[in-house]
Image: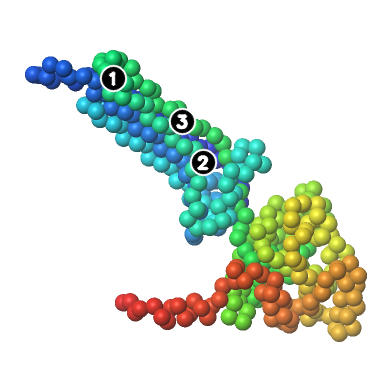
């Protein structure tokens, strides 16, 4: 399935039905009086976050969504039928932006969240509503409210606990493939990852979600390479895992390049907890490992871990460091889930 994380959508709510002007005219009824019914309410356009979606590809092929109009009122005090609502189902983590692509209307971060982005028009009153002691035969009715028409943007930011950062070919996809059931593309050339990937990683009976995004290069904030188009997908992460290629020839420079791009991107991304890892140590001897670690330490204020995604050396230590940084509320405990399943009554 093709990945799409930004879509422009045109929506329109339903207009309210007009009220009816009608009088009761029946045989043997001398004083019938007004009996015009009210118009029905127009349908609303609603956005709902649902499970099972991880892309906005559905909005590539359909961009116009219209709710149903309310039915006009009728005689015999009959109210018109309300218009049908239009529900747009989006992945969890979708932001709804106004037409300027800056004003945030809503942020759907939980399954089942709903927001009305275009409310349907109210139905107009029929002449029955205007009957009074001094106006016993009103000949007026209200028209229904007009529809609301607007353009919105849907922007997806994946929900993950850990975000992978690094230069192209730093070993991010290899790490994700080695620690989860995800199968991202892995090859010996840059930019093998073209769209974000998600994987569920487990360590010590605890699971968390890791997001792999395409690699950054110098000038990504200015649009070079794949630019910073996908950095938004790690904005929601609790911790960032910064992988540095130990065989690149200038790991300290690679580290500084990524930090510069995070700061140029802005927001709180550069201030998030970050774990720095020197990757591909399977190709280095002990002396080279120590030298490169000290070289990166001169520009990196925090501790530096060593790891190899190919030989899996150091991976448990990295996963435990990530687990310690993630908020306890975001971790998924497999033992508790297993116990709950055992206590549940048997079902055929």
Q: Looking at the picture, does residue 323 appear above or below residue 191?
A: below
Indicate the secondary structure of the residue bearing disc 2: strand
Q: Residue at x 68, y 54 (%)?
A: 232
Q: Position of residue 90 (x, y in %)?
A: 52, 51
Colour pattern: rainbow
Mark drawn on residue 27: none
- Cα–Cα gap, marks 2 and 1: 38 Å
Percent across and percent down for residue 287 are 89, 83
N-terminal of the pair, mark 1 or mark 3, is: 1
- Alpha carbon separation for disc pair 1 and 3: 31 Å
Above or below, comparing residue 214 to residue 336 in the picture: above
Instruction: Specify the farthest residue to the bottom.
Output: 286
The answer to whether residue 221 shows anywhere in this view is yes
* Tag nearer the camera, 2 or 1: 1
Query: Is residue 249 visible to us here?
Result: no
Numbered marks: total? 3
Q: Which residue is mark 1?
A: 132
**Residue 147 — which label?**
3
* Residue furthest left in the image: 28
User: How far across and how far down the image is residue 220, in percent?
Assistant: 78, 53
At horizontal 71% and vertical 56% (from top left) the residue drawn is 231
Q: Which of 52/35 is in front?
A: 35
Determine which of the numbered discs, if any, sits on residue 117 in the image. 2
Q: Secondary structure at mark 3?
A: loop
Label located before the other in sequence (2 or 1): 2
Question: Neighbour class for label 3 at 10 Å: few (<14), some, many (≥20)?
Answer: many
Residue 331 lies in quadrant: bottom right
> Neighbour class for label 2 at 10 Å: few (<14), some, many (≥20)?
many
Q: Is residue 227 above or below residue 68?
A: below
């Amino acid at each position: 399935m093709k990945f799409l994380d930004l879509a422009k959508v045109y929506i329109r709510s339903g207009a309210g039905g007009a009220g009816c002007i009608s009088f009761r005219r029946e045989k043997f009824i001398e004083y019938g009086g007004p009996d015009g019914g009210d118009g029905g309410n127009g349908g609303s356009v609603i956005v709902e976050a649902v499970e099972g979606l991880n892309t906005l590809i559905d909005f590539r092929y359909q961009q116009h969504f219209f709710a149903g109009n309310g039915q006009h009122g009728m005689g015999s005090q009959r109210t018109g039928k309300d218009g049908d609502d239009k529900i747009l189902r989006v992945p969890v983590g979708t932001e709804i932006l106004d037409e300027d692509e800056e004003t945030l209307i809503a942020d759907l971060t939980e399954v089942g969240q709903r927001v009305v982005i275009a409310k349907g028009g109210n139905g107009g009153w029929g002449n029955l509503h205007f009957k009074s002691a001094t106006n016993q035969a009103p000949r007026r009715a209200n028209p229904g409210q007009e529809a609301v028409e607007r353009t919105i943007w849907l922007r997806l930011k994946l929900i993950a606990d850990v975000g992978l950062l690094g230069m192209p070919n730093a070993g991010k996809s290899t790490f994700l493939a080695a620690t989860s059931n995800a199968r991202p593309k892995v090859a010996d050339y840059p930019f093998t990852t073209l769209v974000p990937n998600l994987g569920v990683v487990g360590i010590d009976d605890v699971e968390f979600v890791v997001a792999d995004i395409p690699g950054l290069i110098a000038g990504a904030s200015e649009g070079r390479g794949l630019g910073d188009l996908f950095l938004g997908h790690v904005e929601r992460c609790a911790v960032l895992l910064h992988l540095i290629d130990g065989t690149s020839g200038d790991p300290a420079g690679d580290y500084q390049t990524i930090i510069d791009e995070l700061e140029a991107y802005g927001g709180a991304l550069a201030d998030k907890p970050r774990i720095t890892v020197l990757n591909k140590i399977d190709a280095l001897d002990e002396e080279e490992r120590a030298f490169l670690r000290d070289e990166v330490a001169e520009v990196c204020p925090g501790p530096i871990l060593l790891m190899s995604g190919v030989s899996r050396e150091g991976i448990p230590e990295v996963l435990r460091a990530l687990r310690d940084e993630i908020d306890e509320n975001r971790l998924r405990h497999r033992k508790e889930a297993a116990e709950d399943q055992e206590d549940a009554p048997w079902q055929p």
